[in-house]
Image (cartoon, rainbow, N blue to C red):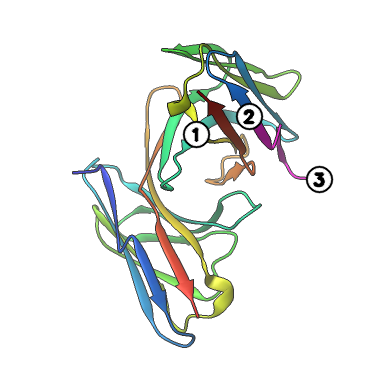
């Protein structure tokens, strides 16, 4: 079992729909990151969370430390949101290692 | 200019050749990393460096070496490339934000070994 599991692996939705991507992890963490990988390959950091909830524009990220689970929500989805969304966790054992999920490929249809 | 610049963006090389991937940053961050991404797998850490005199192996360092020429430059070398090193390679930097280490990634180098 991978330390970081994302679901779904692929998601196709219509423009305007509310999107939820889930991330579950099995280790104690100091922080969880949500990343966006554009079709051209570059990776952009969206959020870093250690507790609670963060919002940036139409994107909302939540984390439940007790349940070892995080969600990334996109409101009023748009075709430009089409990308791969990656969850990564940094363990609380003090090493430098980020453990990455395999990503969720999101496609928004106009 | 991008905060983290990787060159080249794409490279095709032959088995057995030596190849260097370069990374430079304007963030002023001390911490730099090289990751590799393969289809169906999460990014995996190859090497990381906390400052110019510090180099550490990651989880998949075999077949790779690195050089930290300056705070802003971190190069990854494949001494003798092999086909299973075909992958998308990312350089990243990180810095303390007050609540954790935030990361900035380059645009990636797509390497094909034939």
Quadrant of res B54? bottom left
Within 10 Å of disc 1 (Cα), the crowding (few <14, some 14-19, many 20+) is many
For disc 2, the chain is A
Lower position in the chain sequence, tag 3 or tag 2: 3
Q: Which span of residues is magenta-colored?
A: A1-11
Return the mark for residue A92: none
Q: Which residue lies at the image location 36% right of the left edge and 64% below the top edge?
A: B10
Residue with the mark numbered 3: A1
Lower position in the chain sequence, tag 3 or tag 1: 3
Direction from residue A46 to residue B23 in the image, left or right: left
Residue B76 makes an appearance in the image = no
Q: Which residue lies at the image location 45% right of the left edge and 43% below the top edge?
A: A39
Residue with the mark numbered 2: A12
| Spot occupied by residue B53 in the image (x, y as percentages of width and height) | 32, 60
Q: Which residue lies at the image location 41% right of the left edge and 47% below the top edge?
A: A40
Q: Nearer the viewer, residue B22 or B41?
A: B41
Label 3, label 1: how far apart the Cα atoms are: 22 Å
Label 2, label 1: how far apart the Cα atoms are: 18 Å
Disc nearest the viewer among 2 and 1: 2
Q: Quadrant of the N terminus of chain B?
A: top left
Q: Which residue lies at the image location 72% right of the left edge and 24% below the top edge?
A: A68
Residue with the mark numbered 1: A35
| Spot occupied by residue A97 in the image (x, y as percentages of width and height) | 56, 46
For disc 3, the chain is A
Q: Mark 3 and mark 1 in contact? Answer it, CB < 8 Å.
A: no
Quadrant of res A30? top right
For disc 1, the chain is A
**Looking at the image, residue B112 lies above or below residue B40:** below
């Amino acid at each position: 079992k991978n330390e970081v599991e994302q679901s779904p692996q692929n998601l196709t939705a219509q423009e305007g729909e509310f999107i939820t991507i889930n991330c579950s992890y099995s280790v104690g963490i100091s922080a969880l990151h949500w990343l966006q990988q554009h079709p051209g390959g570059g990776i952009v950091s969206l959020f870093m969370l250690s507790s609670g909830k963060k919002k940036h524009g139409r994107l909302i990220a939540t984390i439940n430390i007790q349940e070892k689970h995080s969600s990334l929500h996109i409101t009023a989805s748009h075709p430009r949101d089409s990308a791969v969304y990656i969850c990564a966790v940094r363990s609380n054992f003090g090493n430098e290692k980020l453990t990455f999920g395999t990503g969720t490929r999101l496609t928004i249809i106009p | 200019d991008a905060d983290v610049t990787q060159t080249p963006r794409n490279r095709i090389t032959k088995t057995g050749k030596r190849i260097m991937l370069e990374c430079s940053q304007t963030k002023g961050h001390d911490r730099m990393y090289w990751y590799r991404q393969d289809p169906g797998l999460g990014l995996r850490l190859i090497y990381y460096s906390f400052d110019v005199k510090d180099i550490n192996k990651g989880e998949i360092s075999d077949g790779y070496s690195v050089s930290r020429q300056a705070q802003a430059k971190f190069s990854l070398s494949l001494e003798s490339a092999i086909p299973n090193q075909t992958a998308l390679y990312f350089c990243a930097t990180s810095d303390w934000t007050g609540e954790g280490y935030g990361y900035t990634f380059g645009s990636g180098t797509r390497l094909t070994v034939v």
